[in-house]
Image (tube, rainbow, N blue to C red):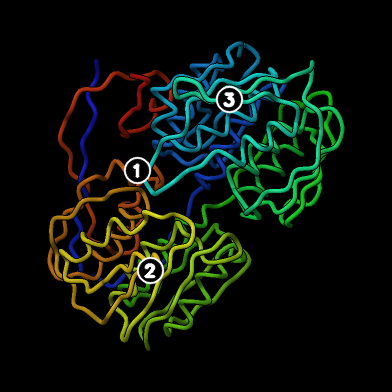
Amino acid sequence: MLDRLETTLRVRGGARLEGSVATHGAKNAALPIMAAALLARGTVTLHRVPHITDVSVMWSLLEALGARIRYEDKNTVTIDASNVASYRAPYALVRKLAASFDIVGALLGRFGRAEVPLPGGCVLGTRATDMHEQAFVALGCDVHNAHGYLIAASRGPKLSGAPIEFRIPSVGATKNAMLAAVLAKGTTTLKNVAMEPEVVDLANFLVAMGARIAGQGTDTIAIEGVRELHGVEYEIIADRVVTGTLLLAGSVTRGDVTVTGCRPDHLQALTDKLVECGVVTVTGDDWIRVKADGITGGTDILTAPYPGFPTDLQPQMVGFLCTCPGTSVVEESIFNARFSYVNELARMGAEVKVTMESNAAIIKGPKQLSGAPVEAPDIRAGAGLVIAALAAAGETEIIGLEYIDRGYDRLEEMLSELGGQVQRSSGVTPLVEPAGFFETSEYPRVSAS
């Protein structure tokens, strides 16, 4: 029995952020790529893996299935799945992480059978699996739900390629369909797919392992099944959500911040909206700079699948818009329960009203926010509260840093590099722990119990 740190974040607002900071690898690319390593004959080496608790859950899940995983250095991981013999995932781990559902496609591709609990993770609204199931059935599986598990099994010796058209673009269903189809017999054509950079990165990783995939980054992906996939060394793309959070941190403090090691083309929807608010943005090949000393007003936003405005930057953007002149409207079209953090912003003095009919937030600014004790309900909402706290007078204590740690590799250190006054504090609770992942880290470990 080990101890886990129950962490809070203390932010003293008012400091103008300045300088340069590097972003890290993308959580939403690393997780499905780790799952995809189940398909490889040989060792997979992944660079730029973020040191976050969501990665530790996927690590533990793969180990529970029989994979051998180790760190080569802080952000380089090797995965050897040659001894994986189980196609049944433990509920205790899958319930912690929605992205763990990505292993369904990988297990189907490897074994022709998968038994995986329905997904968990942050409570953001409905997470339907119907489009995943549609894809598995089209590829030749019998699929049913029993005792909280999705059970899928191939009707023949191998899955068979098929045409599949999704009713709406779904990141999760697109990933699972790709993972199941790369070793299927014949050709699979996926239409109306998600075009997010993390989906493209998964496809590129599979191609690096020997898969035959074309069309990633468009609304149609063609997959020609191959006999096997080999091990590979691969670097994960930059995290566009972390990059965007850091840019918004600079903007909310009216600072001058450059984020390096990123993909500016992945942040176009955000930078366009920042420009509308009066933020000066400059981009290079792998960096973005924001200068925000001339804010002129707010803006209106509709979250949408890529290349639209990302839902995972919505809470951070709302935190920033609370400090902008005029009225802004932010409409959420992806998740139906993403505004749960608004009451916490109100504790800081924000004037935000949520309309349930349109699932939109109406923000009136500018408001001088004040520090207060608040609680993070999920990863991105927690980051949104950090953004607001950076502009608030006095100190804000954000309870639930364990949520933020799921998606950000030491957010407080990145903000401190820019001059922010941000510090974590901890209490202790007991926790049973798997070996391996946190040998080089101070983060709390995650267990299957």
Q: Nearer the viewer, residue 193 or 57?
A: 193
| Lower position in the chain sequence, tag 3 or tag 2 | 3
Q: Mark 2 to mark 1: distance in Å?
A: 27 Å
The answer to whether 101 is drawn above or below residue 431 in the figure is below
User: What amino acid does circle 1 point to?
Assistant: Asp
What element does badge 3 sit on?
Answer: strand
- Say whether residue 279 is left or right of residue 110: left
* Rendered image quadrant of residue 306: bottom right
Please give left or right for residue 216 compared with residue 107 in the image: right
Q: Which residue is mark 1?
A: 405
Circle 1: element type: loop
Seen at 24% across and 19% down, the residue is 2
Mark 3–mark 2 Cα distance, whole angstroms, equals: 35 Å
Amino acid on which disc 2 is placed: Ala
Q: Position of residue 17 (x, y in %)?
A: 32, 69
Please name the residue shown 33% across and 69% down the image: 355
Disc nearer the start of the sequence (2/1): 2
Give the residue pinned by disc 3.
Answer: 144
Tag 2 residue = 360
**For the residues marked 1 and 3, what is the alpha-carbon distance in whole angstroms?**
34 Å
